[in-house]
Amino acid sequence: MTEVFRHSTFISQEIIRLSIIGFYPNNIKWKFLTYLWMVIIYLITAAQMWTVTALTIHSVDLTVISEIFLFSMTQISFINKLISFHMKLKNAAKLERMLSRNVFTQVSLTELAVMKQQFKKCQRVLNIFIVLCFGVVLFYAVFPAIDQGQPGQKNYPFPGEFPFNPDDYYMWVYCGQILTVASSAWTNSAIDCLFQKHVTMATVFFQILCGRFRNVMDKLDENNEEILRRIKKCVIYYNATIEYVSMIQNTFSYGILIQFLCSVIIICLTVFQLSLVVDYNSTKFVLMIIYLLCMMFQVSLYCWYGHILMEKSNEITAACYAINWNDLDLVNQKLLITIMERAKRPVELNALGVFKLNLSTMVTILRTSYSYFAVLQQIYKK
């Protein structure tokens, strides 16, 4: 007995979040306003980066420069990811259409239960990430008001070089900086969550495929024609899943590459700020802790879900071998051998061929960040 399951419901939250700001290709009402908001996001992000990086011209203080580069790397990563996703909007629509194929929507009750269980696990993990993003925005909004500086001095979420006196427009500048962080967190987390959910669905497809291979001879002892029909259906499912993963790779790989390169510097500078610059009793220290957790969690999501996808695709060979293949005719045995040979090469996601999305890459990022931190620490002490 089979059921029809709409996989697009799993990514509906991310579609809504990206549609509101014009970064998803669907026919929604008030499209002009969404495009206007999209342009505003680009403008305020570029303006905020300009005001912050302009400080490097007049500053020789390593602590100030590290704080500037910390914010700059975050925004560079965000803008590149945003532009990359914007250029691949048609691919995002193709991914959604792929999920509506009959090969994916027709599932058994057992497979449906497996899917719902994995989707719930993924959503719980992503909820933690969303809470961390919200915490970063919240603390960026409140720490300048709590951590008072010198008497009469007005604090801002970020340092900046303005062509005017920002104290004359304090509330406008303050709200503008918070709006930059909020829009970045909203869009960035939505793109991240959309990617993780697509990868989770691909992982579940491989898990379902393994179960179908193991059950290819279920209630069929000598009917080789029916077994051949089942194996061919598995091959169609396998090819559709590989095509789906390839589209995920094509849509998100450039943004992931920039994210990983910037994350190395961001984690390094955040640890530097925590260990040597920020006062332990300040609100900013709590902010930097949450920010560090958020960045490490973000990188971990990419590497962890990419690693699980690779492992599940690697189980196809064992699933084929688990069949009583010696009871099959020669045609079915040759077909199984062909599938097993193809499955020897696991399906892997990578960042434009530079980084593979697995746990080894996660360790490499953390190790490189620590190496940079050690060098920066020595420079600071001298």
Image (cartoon, rainbow, N blue to C red):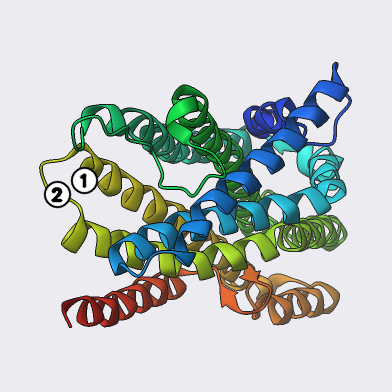
> Observer-nearest residue: 113 or 67?
67
Give, as a three-letter code, the residue at label 1: Phe
Residue assigned mark 1:
285
Residues under numbered marks 1 and 2 in contact, where contact means CB atoms less than 8 Å apart? yes
Sequence-first tag of 1 and 2: 2
> Observer-nearest residue: 293 or 233?
293
Residue assigned mark 2:
279
The residue furthest top is: 29
Dot 2 alpha-carbon crowd within 10 angstroms: few under 14, some 14 to 19, many 20 or more: few
Give, as a three-letter code, the residue at label 2: Asp
- The part of the image, by quadrant, that contains residue 359 is bottom left
Q: Quadrant of the C terminus?
A: bottom left
Q: Secondary structure at mark 2?
A: loop
| Residue drawn at the location 20% of the way across and 58% of the way down | 277
- The part of the image, by quadrant, that contains residue 319 is bottom right
For residue 68, which numbered disc appears in the image? none
Q: Quadrant of the N terminus?
A: top right
The percent coordinates of residue 313 (x first, y second) are 61, 66
Q: Secondary structure at mark 1?
A: helix
The answer to whether residue 100 of the structure is visible from this angle is yes
The answer to whether residue 348 of the structure is visible from this angle is no
The percent coordinates of residue 364 (x first, y second) are 40, 77
